[in-house]
Amino acid sequence: MKNLILWSILFSLFSAFMGCDANPVNRLVNPSPSNISGVWSGAWVIYDDEVKTGGAIMTYNTGATLDFHSTDNPHSGKDCIRYSWDGSPVLTYASLPAHPTDYIQSGYSGFSLICAPTDAQYFTATRNLSLGGYTKITFWARGELFTNVNLRVEANSNDQNQYKYASGYPGVWQGTVTSGWQQYSVKLDTTTTNLNNLAAATDFIKIILLYTPGPDDPPRGNGGTVFLDDIELTK
């Protein structure tokens, strides 16, 4: 878990695009007309067959496989997201521009759908998503995770300690997934403290595969594969 302390600086990372296309950035699209007209009326579709945020994809490390157009039994439509990590040590991006403090770790692997059009604009090109009155993120997931590996989903947050919080804390869901599609929900903070800070959002959603060994477990796990589909900000 000590490696997780660097999550608070991971968001100045170098963005590496991965997937089945030679140029996956071309697959990023602005919100469709239906999303634009309905963005303040109840739901913002973050992913359904394609990324619908108008933002970039930020990966936290190399060494995993990310495919936004997997045709392997999507929940709906023709495509879903497939994220796979075999548990092998991964190179984690710790700082820009030359990554002088990159390091190898085996505790987690992940990516984020960010609000900015490029990773270089991560801190400056924020989005105001608060007008939608959203109270949660819903998503469908299935897959196979090995022993002590969890799927962890985080909403946008201005709290640098978010990585410490257990599932159920505002903006955090963590657990295992089954081989069949199930819907899950991440509750957002809508109080005046607004930890999830949708008025100046940097991220739509963060997806992490997290290995949390016990005292007698090996230092690294075997990772797993997770499929995600129909991700929405909703009331």
Image (tube, rainbow, N blue to C red):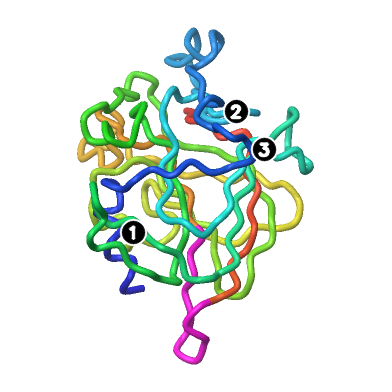
- Which residue type carries mark 3? Cys
Dot 3 crowding, Cα within 10 Å, few <14, some 14–19, many 20+? many
Q: Nearer the viewer, mark 1 or mark 2?
A: 2
- Please state the extent of the stretch shown in magenta in the rendering: 209-220
Residue plotted at (72% across, 47% down): 181
Q: Nearer the viewer, residue 142 or 223?
A: 223
Which residue is tagged 3? 80
* In the depicted structure, whether residue 79 falls above or below residue 214: above
Residue plotted at (74% across, 28% down): 77
Report which quarter residue 4 is drawn in: bottom left
Q: Nearer the viewer, mark 3 or mark 1?
A: 3
Which residue is tagged 1? 163
Q: Are marks 1 and 2 in contact (CB under 8 Å)?
A: no
- Which residue type carries mark 1? Tyr
Report which quarter residue 224 is drawn in: bottom right
Q: List the single residue furthest toward the right.
A: 73
* Residue 175 percent across, percent down from the top left: 55, 61
Q: For the stretch drawn in magenta, what is the main secondary structure?
A: loop
**Between discs 2 and 3, the one toward the N terminus:** 2
- Which residue type carries mark 2? Glu
Dot 2 crowding, Cα within 10 Å, few <14, some 14–19, many 20+? some
Q: Is residue 214 magenta?
A: yes
Q: Secondary structure at mark 1?
A: helix
| Horizontal side of residue 25 vs 197, given as left or right | right
Q: Are marks 2 and 3 in contact (CB under 8 Å)?
A: no
Which residue is tagged 2? 50
**Between discs 1 and 2, the one toward the N terminus:** 2
Report which quarter residue 55 is drawn in: top left
Q: Secondary structure at mark 3?
A: strand
**Between discs 3 and 1, the one toward the N terminus:** 3
